[in-house]
Image: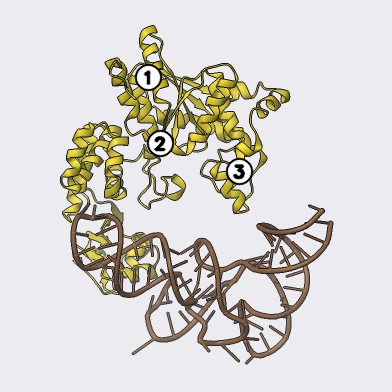
Chain colours: A yellow, B brown
RNA sequence: GGGGAGAUUCCGGAGCGGCCAAACGGGCCAGACUGUAAAUCUGGUGGCUCAGCCUUCGGCGGUUCGAAUCCGCCUCUCCCCA
């Protein structure tokens, strides 16, 4: 496809667009647009839509944002569409259930945090942010009907998520059929050159391309990035509890990356979530996977917390790996209500919240999961009193506390 | 509007008068193994003053020596037909 006469500057940009990308519809069109952008000095308008349905971004979102950042550095214009109007519909992509629409108040509340967190990756000062209520609120009912006339029911229903829901007799709100059209209309309104989305977004992205063509514009180029999975193999999502959030402290982030990424996904994570050159990634993967995993964790943690944060996270991680426990053990006070009394170990654990209940604590002790001052104690009624303080207590591999007076 | 099915411990889902704190699977916790991974194996998974006791099976009331299991009412879900 890339002809031998392809301008090297165009080729270089194409490489950025291509890294980790799944769909690119169509590559030759993109080459042409890049070439013309270079010739005229006019940046491409690159659209990315976000639903302000949740305030907290996680590593899964970072895949797209990092791509946008790279594109931004090429000098193109990122247009972030805040889907405040579409959020009230709810994107049916990947959903098997009708989801409740959000109120305007919810949306406004999420928006600030949302944009703020995206700013950890994107240069927001160079990003155009548009709310799609800007044009949707201005539409009259006849405008809506005209837009709806642009698509057929069969075309909408052929979508896999709708097909599945029909088959499973799950409800599909009529309003949900509108979502792809609304998203597509955004592209028309901002005269979009290309739009990025997750692989689950391809259908929606293509609606934009079609609508633009129908409106006399050149249809946008569409490209998609993979969705990353959490440690449990499911799509990373806050509601599944498998997400690594942008705002997590360095150690947590580092540790979660190590624990989350299966060996089979290492290559993808490097490709999608770091800027380590592809050749270097290949070399890393040819070596010790353990080392590659730690490197990945450093790269990701470093991106969000800087080199110092990444280093401290790694040090902490290694300290724990050596079995030394956390560098800085949380202190808990001897429970005031038991001042001056001896307590059975199980009750002590529950009292300082190292276990949920006395019964829970008792079980842990009986399973050899509890260490006091580094030694396993298997007797749940072993008595401790304030004279024994301070006590370093550990339940399981990761929960530590120092009990003090 | 009419007809039917059902609500059980974190989830799914058995149980249909005593042997039920309630099978089984998932999840989760812990132990072994390990790369604090994955996979695997083992144990655990209502509470407590823990070889025993106490409180649970949508809610309220009833039958019974005894109810998650039977009866009545209530609340909420789902399905089919229109």
Q: Looking at the image, which residue is at 20% across and 47% down?
A: A289
Mark 1 lies on residue: A31
Q: Along the line of sight, which residue is nearer the eye, B79 or A30?
A: A30
Position in image of residue A338 (x %, y %): 35, 65
Binning the other alpha carbons within 10 Å of mark 2 as few (below 14), some (14 to 19) or many (20 upward) gives many
Mark 1–mark 2 contact, CB under 8 Å? no
Q: N-terminal of the two: label 1 or label 2?
A: 1
Whether labels 1 and 3 belong to a single chain: the reply is yes
Q: N-terminal of the two: label 1 or label 3?
A: 1
Q: N-terminal of the two: label 2 or label 3?
A: 2
- In the image, which disc is placed on residue A61? 2
Residue A98, compared with residue A150, is above or below; it is below
Count how many numbered circles sit on residues in the image: 3
Q: Along the line of sight, which residue is nearer the eye, A325 or B17?
A: B17
Q: Is A373 on the left or on the right of B25, as rendered?
A: left
Disc 3 sits on a residue from what chain? A
Q: Is B69 on the left or on the right of A52, as rendered?
A: right
Mark 3 lies on residue: A100
Position in image of residue A107 (x %, y %): 55, 33
Q: CA distance from mark 2 to mark 3?
A: 22 Å
The C terminus of chain A lies in quadrant: bottom left
Position in image of residue A250 (x %, y %): 28, 40
Q: CA distance from mark 1 to mark 2?
A: 26 Å
The kind of secondary structure element at disc 1 is helix
């Amino acid at each position: 496809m890339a002809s031998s006469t392809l301008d090297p500057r165009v080729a270089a940009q194409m490489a950025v667009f291509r890294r980790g990308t799944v769909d690119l519809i169509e590559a030759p069109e993109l080459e042409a647009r890049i070439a013309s952008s270079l010739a005229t000095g006019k940046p491409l308008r690159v659209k990315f839509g976000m639903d302000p349905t949740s305030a907290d971004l996680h590593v899964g979102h970072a895949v797209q944002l990092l791509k946008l950042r790279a594109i931004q550095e090429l000098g193109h214009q990122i247009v972030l569409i805040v889907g405040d109007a579409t959020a009230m519909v709810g994107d049916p992509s990947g959903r098997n259930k009708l989801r409740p629409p959000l109120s305007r108040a919810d949306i406004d509340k999420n928006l600030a945090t949302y944009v703020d967190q995206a700013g950890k990756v994107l240069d927001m000062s160079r990003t155009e942010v548009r709310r799609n209520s800007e044009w949707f609120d201005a539409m009259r009912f006849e405008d809506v009907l005209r837009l709806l006339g642009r698509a057929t029911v069969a075309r909408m229903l052929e979508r896999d998520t709708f097909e599945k829901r029909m088959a499973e007799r799950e409800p599909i709100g009529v309003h949900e059929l509108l979502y792809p059209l609304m998203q597509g209309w955004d592209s028309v309104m901002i005269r979009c050159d290309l739009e990025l989305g997750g692989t689950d977004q391809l259908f929606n992205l293509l609606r934009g391309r079609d609508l633009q063509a129908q409106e006399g514009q050149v249809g946008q180029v569409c490209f998609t990035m993979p969705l990353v999975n959490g440690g449990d193999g499911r799509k990373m999502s806050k509601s599944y509890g498998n997400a690594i959030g942008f705002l997590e402290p360095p150690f947590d982030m580092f540790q979660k990356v190590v624990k989350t990424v299966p060996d089979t996904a290492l290559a993808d994570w490097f490709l999608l979530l770091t800027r380590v050159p592809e050749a270097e990634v290949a070399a890393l993967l040819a070596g010790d996977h353990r080392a590659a995993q730690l490197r990945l964790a450093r790269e990701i943690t470093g991106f969000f917390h800087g080199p110092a944060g990444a280093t401290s996270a790694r040090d902490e991680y290694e300290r724990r790996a050596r079995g030394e426990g956390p560098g800085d053990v949380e202190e808990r006070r001897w429970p005031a209500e038991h001042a001056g009394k001896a307590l059975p170990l199980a009750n002590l654990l529950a009292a300082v919240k190292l276990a949920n209940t006395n019964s829970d604590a008792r079980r842990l002790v009986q399973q050899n999961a509890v260490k006091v001052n580094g030694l396993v104690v298997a007797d749940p009624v072993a008595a401790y009193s304030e004279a024994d303080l301070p006590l370093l207590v550990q339940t399981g591999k990761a929960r530590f506390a120092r009990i003090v007076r």
